[in-house]
Each structure stands twice: as structure tokens, then as C-alpha cells.
Image: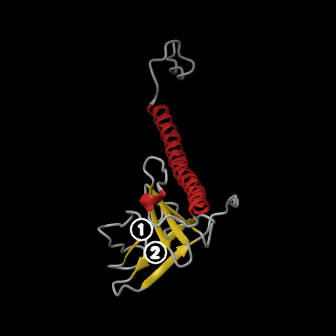
Amino acid sequence: MLPTQPKSLFERKNPRGFTIVELLIVIVVIGILAAITIVAFNGIQSRARVALIQSDLNGAVKTLGLLNVTNGTYPADLATANLRASTGTTYQYTYTSTGNSYCLTATNNGVAYNVSITNPALIVGICPGHTPPNLLVNNGVVSTLAGINSTGYVDATGLAARFTSPALKPLISVARPLPRSPLPH
């Protein structure tokens, strides 16, 4: 009798396990699915932060408008305004009495938006004179973006940035307004 060839894995009556190739394919597929999930989750978190700040600023603008109508002027400081904010959101407020105007910055986890009486649309970034969110890299040295020993910050959405050279001259200052519906008066 002639010796017979062993049957393939699919033809065997009692397969004993998976081949190394099959296991590697399963591991690669799981890795790809995990990477897609992580990227999607980070995008959702970023959009949630932006929506939270926008909601906080919309509420703050309405409160400031109500205080202006009630008192005939906007509040002189943030404590007087008594603005409500979601967990993690912080405000910076500047009032100018000569024009009865204000500029309000809201930050949350490095994302910053501002709104002012002169520009009621939400703008990515901070008001002039306000402290940028804590987004400094390497103790304030951002060498890969604006050159060695330059300082600055980049908004978490990537839409706003400001960098300064060692001579303290602005190198880059970018802010794009975010489209939104007008506020009720």
C-alpha cells in the first residue's frame, strides 16, 4: 500500500488548532479596529469640548445682555457678572467702560473661544490681553512649529495659534471665526 498525503486542515476530522498565519490575521484585524475606534473617540471628545464651550459662551452672552438691560451697563468684572460655566470651563472677562463693551474668553482643556460686544460671533482663540490656555509645549519653547526658543500656543482644534519670537515680535497669529446662528437681542 502506498503512503497517502496528509489531509489539509479543512479535511481533517479532528483539527487541533489555528495556524500561526490565521492567528496573525486575527491580531492585525483587531489592531486595525482598535485604532479606528481610538481615533473616532478622540474626534468625538474634541467636538464635545467645542460644543460645551460654545454652549457656555452662548449662555454667558445672554446673561451679560440681561445684566446690561437691567443695569444699563455690562458688569465691571467677572465676579459681578456671576456667569455660570460647565465643569472645566473657565472665563476671562474684560470690560471697557468708555464704550460699554466687553470681551469674554472661555477655555476648557486647552480649547479657547471668545466673544465680544463688537463681534458677537464665536471666534476660536482668546481676547486681546487674556492669558492663553495652558498649551505651551516644552516649558514654553515650541521649536518644531515656530523656530527655536519661540513661545506660543495652538488651540486644540488647530484653528487658532499665536507664536512669538525671542525678540517678542509676533510671528504667527491665526484665528478663524466659527459659523453660528446670530444671538437673539
Q: Residue at x 41, y 63 (%)?
A: 133
From mark 2 to mark 1, how far is it between C-alphas? 9 Å
Front label number (2 vs 1): 1
Residue 178, percent from left and from top: 63, 64
Seen in the image, is 167 located left or right of residue 58? left
Residue at 53% x, 40% y is 33
In the image, 46 versus 117, the foreground residue is 117
In-image side of 60 versus 182 (left or right): left
Give the percent coordinates (x, y) of residue 79: 42, 58
Asked if the residues shown at circle 2 and circle 1 are in contact, with their CB atoms under 8 angstroms apart, the answer is yes
Is 12 above or below relative to 103? above
Question: Farthest residue in the left direction?
Answer: 139
For the residue marked with disc 2, what is the amino acid? Answer: Arg
The residue depicted at 44 percent of the width and 46 percent of the height is 87
Q: Which of the 4 image quadrants contains residue 146?
A: bottom left
**Residue at the front extreme, as displayed:** 71
Q: Is residue 167 left or right of residue 23?
A: left
Residue picked out by circle 2: 162
Residue that appears at 53% across and 16% down: 12
Task: Residue 113 in the image: state x and y as whole percent.
Answer: 53, 63
> For mark 1, what is the residue?
132
Q: As displayed, is residue 68 above or below residue 44?
A: below
Q: How is the image coloured?
A: secondary structure
Mark 1 belongs to which amino acid?
A: Pro
Helix or strand or loop: what does disc 2 sit on? strand
Residue 101 — which label?
A: none
Callout 1: SS: loop
Asked which quadrant contains residue 66, the reply is: bottom right
Q: Nearer the viewer, residue 35 or 24?
A: 35
